[in-house]
Amino acid sequence: MADIIIRNLTKKYGSETALNNVSLEIKSGEFMVLLGPSGCGKTTLLRCLAGLETPDQGEIIIGDKVVFSSADNIMSPPGERSLGMVFQSYALWPHMTVRDNIKFGLDVLNTPKNVSNDTLDSVLKSLGMKEFENRYPSELSGGQQQRVALARLLATKPPVFLMDEPLSNLDARLRMDMRVELKKFQSESEATTVYVTHDQTEAMTMSTRVVVMKNGEIQQVASPGNLYRHPSNTFVADFIGMPRINLINLTKKHKDGSVFINKDVQIDVGWVPASNEIVLGAHPEDLVVSKKEIPSSEKYSVTAVLPNGPETIIQLTRGKTAVIARVAHDSSFNVDESVYVNFSVSSLNIYDSKNGVIIEPSNN
Amino acid sequence: MNLNTQKRWLDLNLRRLLLNPVNIALTILLIVLAYLVLWPFFQLVFETLTWGEGDRRFSRDAVPGEFTWFHWLQATASPISEKMLYSPLINTLITGVIATILALSAGGFLAWCVVRSNMPGKGWLQPVLTLPYIIPSFAIALAWETVFRSPKVGGQPGLYESILGVAPPEWLSYGTVPISITLAIHYFPFAYLLVAGALATIDSQMEESALISGAGKLTILRKITFPVVAPAFVAAFILTFGKTIGQFALPFLLGAPVQFHTVATMVYANLALGLDSLAFVLAVILIVISLISIWLSNRFIKKKSSRFETIGGKGFRSREVNLGQWRWPVFSVVALFAFVVGILPLILLAIQSIMLIDGFYGLENLTWHFWTGKSNPDIAFGEPGVFHNNNIIGATWNTLKLASLSAVIASIIGLIIAYIVVRKSDNLLANALDQIAFIPFLFPTIAFGAMYLTLFAEPVGPIPALYGTFTLLVLISVVSRLPYSVKTGVTAVTQIGKELEEAAEVAGASWGMRFRRIVMPLASSGLTSGMMVSFVGVMRELSLIILLITPSTRVLMTAGFGYAEEGLTQLSNALVLIVAVLTIIGELILWWIGKGRMTRLREKL
């Protein structure tokens, strides 16, 4: 219902730069997740959007309204940005009942009583919270509190939702259920949603696009699938994926050749990257592990076997190079066993070891 | 961005800063508090360093308003210094140290019994043990006098002489011994609370591991428990000492009849003699001692917190020490002690207030005259009983008015200051506000009264001479309560998550609406109990306002003090008893509020 455009946003706290020249366009109705380690600036960016922080430089446009512009001296207060927000702690007012909590936003807008009552009833019903309307937040379970926080958004139906790690206070099982519920909630409401999290599973499962941030700068903006397959630099590659991607430092063996080596291993990447010093990115599932010898493979020894339900993670070493591989749960590898490993060339990503930037998308 | 837009950007930011209601409140409060807290101190010091009008009596060189060291020299190096400064100073230090040692020993022992042992009856002993600190110190002094009054200094014999037939030795009636003991009785609950707090932070696992290593109970107490609480003990010592030296009414009542003075009583005595500047010098000295002791205690507390960080979130539990066969003997001692210091003084005051001729113990001597009687020229110079005495009724009315007004104003201003301090914790001015609001805590109350006496004696600019007005009493009571009400407020505001307010802000609520609908309701329970604490605190206050009281603004405490000075013991006993009962009722309400909140919380969990 509203596009969000962020241009050259900079925010400093003293000498700390929280946001460094960040630009981003979010399309109407999109579920955009801001992902990154703590201190990467994702929450600051969200709070700048909300108007709870004042950026130093740049411009923010929500819908067709410029809500912040350092050039034109515009700084709209949060209440005039037509957005709703779910906080990490939910920020439910403990002295108000569930109904009053949801009603507050309508009161601020001076909604007539009968309209407000109808809205409240339908919102409470749609989230299955009708029977709890006279309870206080402290009398609700974590999931119910979460629903009240969402209900506050539904009552005023703003075109933009901002969510700051809303699932981080729930236990693992409930988090799973709420992910599904939240995704459904968002697609039904059609609101443009900006969602902050440090949990990559949350980011991957819920978003239409993910923004990966580090040190106040955007590293990559991509759909979850693309982000996983083609991380645009070694930071993103290392950050996304569980277990972690294998990053191996290699040197070109012959000029204009496609074979790369280090002291222990030799890998043919199948094409000729421009750089001589590279970092090879191979997801654990991109390693083919076999007990029998297979073409263009090398011999590794198994140093750890970690069964994990539907899959088994094994650690392999050759000399000082250690890699992680993901194999089927029914495969039977033992520690100290020797195995043959081959890298599926088509799925590899190659980064310049000087700056960690991807050299060319691998051709799959 | 060119220069022009940069300027516009600055203008905009500046305008937003200036129009922010929080910033406006911050600026106003800073200016007002600087005038009410910092300026009086400078004014006081200034008075001691200039000639006053009255000084023409002492020196021909006196030029009012000119600089002089005269008063400081007079206090420290003149024939009267011994009487004016040195002997009161020594008396202050000696009574303070003895009282503190007694208070800390009693408080420490009781704290250990209540917090760490399995002594029976803790539940009801604890409130009784805090009684002496709740009632006015003056009440304890009066009760002491009732028992140990010596006819040598005039008046009727006390209970001691009536029972034993011999007069008590003078050292037991007046001077160092009774002052130290009554101060200790008044302040041991304070020490008790400080030590109990420290003891409650000891993780029993420390002691248990010593137990497993084979150490005996006494060894554990000596080698583990005591060293860990020692820094808190030292801090409690200094804080208690700092409190005793500011006491005025108690040492005055038990010292003045034999010309025994402390610095605090000397301030009062000098003002009564018209030696204002000398009194102010003594007030400054009192403040300096107080500042040094608080600075020292802060150093110890800091050291403690870095070295003995024992409060862990996990695995923390406190085990009770089994007293075994000593359970009941210990209980009896504690209960007897609690009765003697907590309840007996009030009973004595009550009995004393219904005796026709004090010191004469017998049923035929009992009368309700001092409570319900009308004026009778044969009794007490014709002063009517409490219920017919316009003086006392007026004082009661004044007391309630002063206490409730000050409590409400102090709590609301305290909450606003706390809000600013918590929400703008990175702002230098907000920090300055926090510091200034705490400063009244550092001033001994009688010295603070002296400051306001100098500041408001004459009109300054638009501010009228407030001396003798009720407004001045409210003003000083509010400012003296601020350190406490800001502290309560900070606790209350800190508990209100910032996100709760931001959620309302995102919904579009203005600052006023947020403060009214989110902050105030959530802080209300803390605010109410803070108000009650201030109410009780102001009601029993004497030394703070004794210098500022005029006949038309008298309150119960000062009226009671006045009667005691005139020798009308029954009436002064009756008044102090009224204050004591009112404060106890206040504390009960407070306890009830606290309990109510606890149960409500428990129901919700």
Image: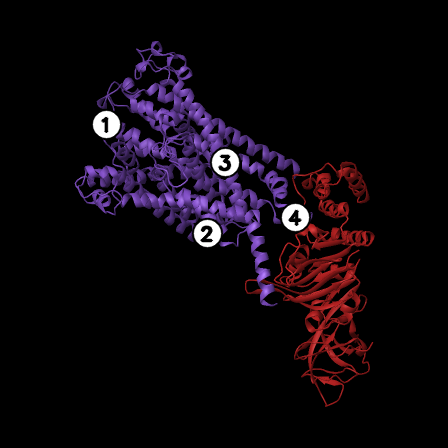
Chain colours: A red, B purple
Per the model, the C-alpha gap separating discs 3 and 2 is 34 Å
Q: Are marks 1 and 3 in contact (CB under 8 Å)?
A: no
Q: Which residue is mark 4?
A: B505
* Marking on residue B409: 3
Q: Is residue B155 left or right of residue B24?
A: left
Marked residue nearer the N-terminal end (4 or 3): 3
Residue B14 or A144: which is nearer the viewer? B14
Q: Nearer the viewer, mark 3 or mark 2?
A: 3
The three-letter amino acid code for the residue at tag 3 is: Ile
The three-letter amino acid code for the residue at tag 2 is: Ser
* Marking on residue B305: 2
The three-letter amino acid code for the residue at tag 1 is: Glu
- Identify the residue shown where x is 79% and y is 36%: A114
**Helix, strand or loop at disc 1?**
helix
Marked residue nearer the N-terminal end (4 or 2): 2
Q: Are marks 4 and 3 in contact (CB under 8 Å)?
A: no
**How far across and how far down the image is residue A216, in percent?**
64, 65
Answer whether residue B255 is visible to the viewer in this image. Answer: yes
